[in-house]
Amino acid sequence: MNSTRFKLGKYTNTLTSGSASWSSPSNIALVKYWGKKEHQIPENPSISFTLDACKTITEIKFEKREGDQSTFSFEVFLDDMPKPDFHPKIETFFNRIEAYLPFLKEFHFTIHTQNTFPHSSGIASSASGMSALALCLMSIEKQLNPKLSDSDFIQKASFLARLGSGSACRSLEGDLVVWGAHPEIEGSNDLFGVKYPYKVHDNFKNYQDTILLVDKGEKQVSSTIGHNLMHGHPFAKQRFDQAVGNISKIKNILESGDLEAFIALVESEALTLHAMMMTSMPYFILMKPNTLEIINKIWSFRQETGLPISFTLDAGANVHVLYPEKDADQILEFIKSQLVAYCQNGHYICDKIGFGAKQS
Ligand code: DP6
């Protein structure tokens, strides 16, 4: 597949002003994206659960500019407060996507954004934030070119979101999304995320994700730096091959509903991600002592009760506790009585699988 298909010809409509608004969720990878090539092309395919409660709501107002149009013109507000420190990231994003959205320099944009989760929760807002922004920009393109089909709209929005942050391209739809070409997943490709196209066992319907906020501080090493450390990493090739194999395995697991195999695969993926960080040069550790305390408690509880509780991690210290809806009462009780003590200020978020972004 070639990215030139996302360059449209002339727009049919002209606009002087207007607005667009979307809410878009975060997502949690089961098979992780870690390592990328130029232009945000992933080194391996990944698959994620789309989340429901953790989301970003973004509104863009746009107005035709007069005079000089050699630079981008925008202002951004988080919770109605000006947020100049978001400017460099948005500027970089606009530079990457300008070739695909030729109207970007013709308008002044006022961007208002808010998250449903606390700002300094250590939860990456880049997936929800970049996908919400990409969708708003696509809504503007749709106003300029009303003939754009729904499937072209969503594919291009995911394509643009990917250029903002790789994992963001998996946030637009639900409940499972694959990004990165894989021979056994029809339609999968490196340019945008696709809804997982096969049967999913009822065990995974409404799967729960309780996010334990172990460390709400700024990460010492950003994902972007971490991805780059996979270049020349001694285990890179094995890791990328393993991820390809794990996508094949998870396809069978999702169909059969084999929770034991699901747990083994997802926990191994989480620990492999962090093992890649620990074996990078320079090496780094994003887990905290309480991350390990929680993991050990989960393992003991699983052994004692036989309940299908598992964990995964993203690029940070927080723990995502995953479990089927039917066991939610018992597992939530365990989380509250034994795990919340390891969270910073006792904070955690109850989330579950969701179905993607919504226009508002
Ligand atoms: C560990 O998508 O945040 O969460 O493309 O540089 O913005 P950039 O990285 P990002 O990386 C996410 C890494 C991960 C795994 C995953 O979500 O697949």
Image (cartoon, helix red, strand yellow):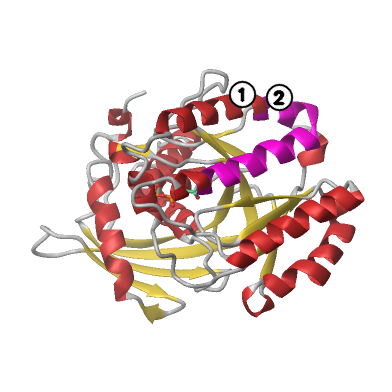
Instruction: Give above or below for 197 relative to 295.
Output: above
Span shown in magenta: 250-274
Q: Position of residue 56 (x, y in %)?
A: 52, 63
Tell me the crowding category of disc 1: few under 14, some 14 to 19, or many 20 or more residues within 10 angstroms, Cα based: some
- Taking depth in this image into account, of 226 and 196 the one nearest to the observer is 226
Question: Who is closer to the viewer here, 22 or 198?
Answer: 198
| Identity of the residue drawn at 61% across and 24% down | 248
Q: Is label 1 within 8 A of ligand 1 (CB to nearest ligand atom)?
A: no
For mark 2, does the 10 Å Cα neighbourhood hold few (<14), some (14 to 19), or many (20 or more) residues?
A: some
Type of secondary structure dominating the magenta stretch? helix
- Say if mark 1 contacts mark 2, CB within 8 Å: yes
User: Looking at numbered disc 2 in the image, what kind of residue is underneath it?
Assistant: Asn
Front-lying residue, 294 or 357? 294
Q: Quadrant of the N terminus?
A: top left
Can residue 184 be spotted in the picture?
yes
The residue that appears at 27% across and 41% down in the rendered structure is 100
Residue name at image x 77 percent, y 52 percent: 299
Residue 334 location (% of width, % of height): 84, 64
Q: Is mark 2 within 8 Å of ligand 1?
A: no
Q: Is residue 148 above or below residue 62?
A: above
| Residue position for label 1 | 248
Residue at left offset 73%, top offset 41%: 263
Q: Is residue 291 on the magenta stretch?
A: no
Q: The residue under label 1 is which amino acid type?
A: Ser
Check residue 252 in the rendering and tell me which mark sits there, or answer none.
2
Q: Quadrant of residue 41?
A: top left
Horizontal and vertical percent position of residue 268: 63, 40
Regarding residue 140, the answer to whether it shows in the image is no
On the image, the x and y values in percent for residue 276 come to 46, 44
